[in-house]
Amino acid sequence: MSMQIRKVRPDEIDDVWRVHVASSSDLAVRGGGSARSSDEPVPSDARVALTTDSDGYFCAVEDGRMRGIVSALVRGRVWYLSMFFVLPGDQGRGVGRALLEPALAYGEARGTDVRCVCSSLGSHAQARYVMAGMAPRWPIYRLDGDAAAAARLQERVGLDPRARELPHDPGAAEKLIAEVFVDDRARDLAHWRGDTSATVAIERGGELAAFAYRRGDQIGPAAGRDETAFLQAVAGAAVAGGAGSVTVRVPGACASLLEALVSCGFQLRIVAVWLSSRTFGRPELYLPSGPILY
């Protein structure tokens, strides 16, 4: 039976995640890391594109089995490659190329003029993205800190006493993300709010200057109009909910935030590389939610 490239159906999300885990686990093991659990639950972020970008969600199927998946998101003028995975035993057969073509076409049909991706560290993957017109811009770091490190961060940035956990105006948050990153994120914000354990907002003069979401032990997204407010919002999210460890994925463009986190004892390692067809927004003032929705 020949390979079929088609759109992913909503009832196939478990198969999608099986491909994701198998492929990323294989990459981790080859890089000297640990394998991921095959029964890892599907994160809520992976389901969002089935509603927002179903026309950019494709799978490769052969002999009744899903062999690869790709998910592309369009937000305003920006095309983002959210997920792109092929089973280890099917790599090198042209499956990835066959999947990437309709995903790119989806962005072209929507009139996007920027392409970007949060790539693995593998040179093969990055070469594929370079050939698609995206160039490496900066690394993405994962930083992990315990409660003591989070407390030191709060003390270091001088958290504004007006910072508080509150249900801020969703429209103000969407406007702020549009200023520093991309627009058309209302549905993403609605999803994040429903999955958030704490929201910290910094207000100045009655306006939202920065905000940060905390989901479990993960911080992101976060955005700010200036570095001071941005760092204060992230610090507030780090200590929200009391004691416990916290994880942040920080783009290399966020130099001030990186320096503050490392100085306060957060442990750092490179986990990905950001590539884009050109730079846009103010990346030093945006913290992604993670690799899937960014």
Image (tube, rainbow, N blue to C red):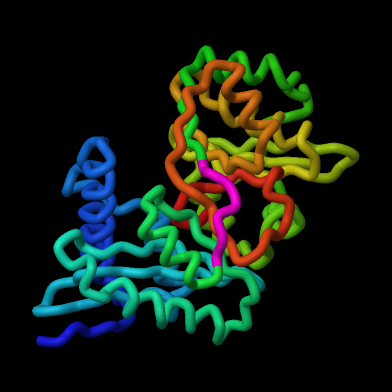
Which residue ends up furthest to the right in the rendered image? Answer: 205
Camera-side residue of 171 and 151: 151
Confirm whether residue 294 shows in the render: yes
Q: Position of residue 185 (x, y in %)?
A: 62, 62
Res 156 quadrant in image: top right
Q: Position of residue 108 (x, y in %)?
A: 56, 83
Q: Position of residue 34 (x, y in %)?
A: 23, 36
Please name the residue shown 77% across and 22% down the image. Answer: 161
Camera-side residue of 195 and 86: 86
Confirm whether residue 246 shows in the render: no
Camera-side residue of 100 and 32: 32
- The answer to whether 59 appears left or right of 189 in the picture is left
Q: Position of residue 76 (x, y in %)?
A: 65, 71
Res 51 quadrant in image: bottom left
Residue 273 included in the magenta stretch of the image: no
**Which region shows up in magenta?**
134-140
- The answer to whether 254 appears left or right of 13 in the picture is right
